[in-house]
Image (cartoon, rainbow, N blue to C red):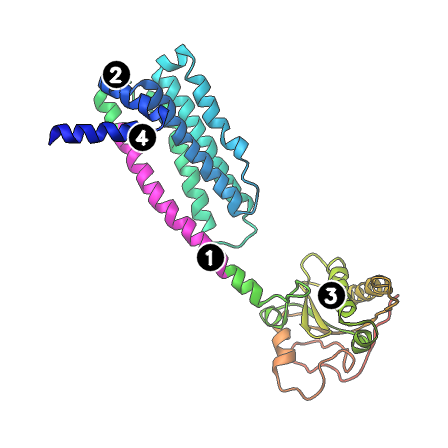
Amino acid sequence: MGAKLQQDGAGLVGQLPPAARRLDHAVRRHGSIPAWASIDLANAVLYGSFALTWSGARVFDRRSAEPVWCMVGVIIWLLACRLPQFAASIELRALVGSSIVTTYTWLAAYEFWRGRDEALVSRWPAIFMLFAHGALFLLRTPLAAMFHISPSDAFSQSAWLELISMEALLFTISIAFILLAMAKERTEYGHREAARTDALTGIFNRRGFLELKPTAVLLIDLDNFKSINDRFGHAIGDRVLQTFAESTAVNLPSEGLVGRWGGDEFVAVLYDTGREEAKAAAKRMQSTFQRLAADINGHPVNATLSVGMVFSPEGRSICRRCWCRPTKRSTSPKSWGGTASKAEAEPTSFRKKMTAA
């Protein structure tokens, strides 16, 4: 039976790649794994895994993977292992190896920190875990020197290895759940944004605006938009809508938002602004749009727009107040365009078309 197992094992070894067969022969000959495999190659694979963690963090935030830089740590380690002084010093190998691990781990934390504009709550625990994990590896050599842990002290080395192994196990389990939570949170965040965004223009839709509490609301209506569609076609009409979205975004204050209410109606909201500043922003919107929409893809469209405004110095939820109450009159700025000093007040029922200065 033993001879049969030995024969089968020899047959399996014969099917291994040449490098693996050489490793198997070395173990059989010397009774142990050679240093080039247990130290050089094994650690190179370990450092490559940390490099992949950094690469994965870049890909998660929609940046390139940088495979060349992923190999830098591995190459540094393999070249250093060719130096006799390096191979003979356990402390030096530990310092270089810990530095490689810390570098890639902190780079992964930095990549997640760079993408902090994306409102993911689970991003911050991931940054903390990666930073702490890298710091532990970086402090490995100073801590060993502080507590006088000698490389020849088997007991101390064993205790340190147990600590590192336990931390690595807890880190692996924790970071796996945190990264899974980040992916799930991003999916949910994307769904919420899609529900609040107009697909054609890429700006807020009605649902998105009902969640806001601005100081001033500008209601914008493209003049004679149906006529534009009838004369030039719906493709030109869509381009007019996109031109409005592009031109308005650059004329609003940095904290302002613009969105599509429906059809040819748009809404812009302003925060912490006065009445005159809001009127000036509306005039800039109208002037820029009229200039850009005069010619659309070679067609003399000459599109214009009308603007109405509701102002509330208290910054209450005037969006929902204006449109969710029973409609006694049209909400189009062609029907009303006056301002109200309070959010509770009904908009003044008269037409006021703002003209560019």
Q: Give the range drawn in magenta.
A: 160-188
At x 40%, y 22%, the residue is 95
Report the front residue among 338 and 25. 25
18 with respect to 108 (left or right): left
Q: Mark 3 points at which residue?
A: 274
Q: Judge whether 55 appears above or below 212 on screen.
A: above
Q: Residue 338 falls in which quadrant of the image?
A: bottom right
Label 2, secondary structure: give it. loop
Q: How crowded is mark 2: few (under 14 residues within 10 Å), some or many (20 or more)?
A: few
| Amino acid carrying mark 2 in the image | Ser
Question: To which residue does mark 2 refer?
Answer: 152
Amino acid type, label 3: Gly
Q: Is residue 336 left or right of residue 116?
A: right
* Residue 47 rendering spot, x and y as whole percentages: 42, 30
Cα–Cα gap, marks 4 and 3: 80 Å
Mark 2 and mark 1 in contact? Answer it, CB < 8 Å.
no
Q: Are marks 4 and 3 in contact (CB under 8 Å)?
A: no
Whole-angstrom CA distance, mark 3 to mark 1, is 37 Å
Q: Is mark 3 on a helix, strand or loop?
A: loop
**Position of 5 compared to 92: left or right?**
left
Can residue 175 be seen here? yes
Q: In which quarter of the image is residue 130?
A: top left
As rendered, which of 34 and 269 lies closer to the eye?
34
Instruction: Give the number of the disc on residue 15.
Output: 4
Q: Is residue 268 magenta?
A: no
Decide which of tag 2 and tag 4 comes sooner along the chain.
4
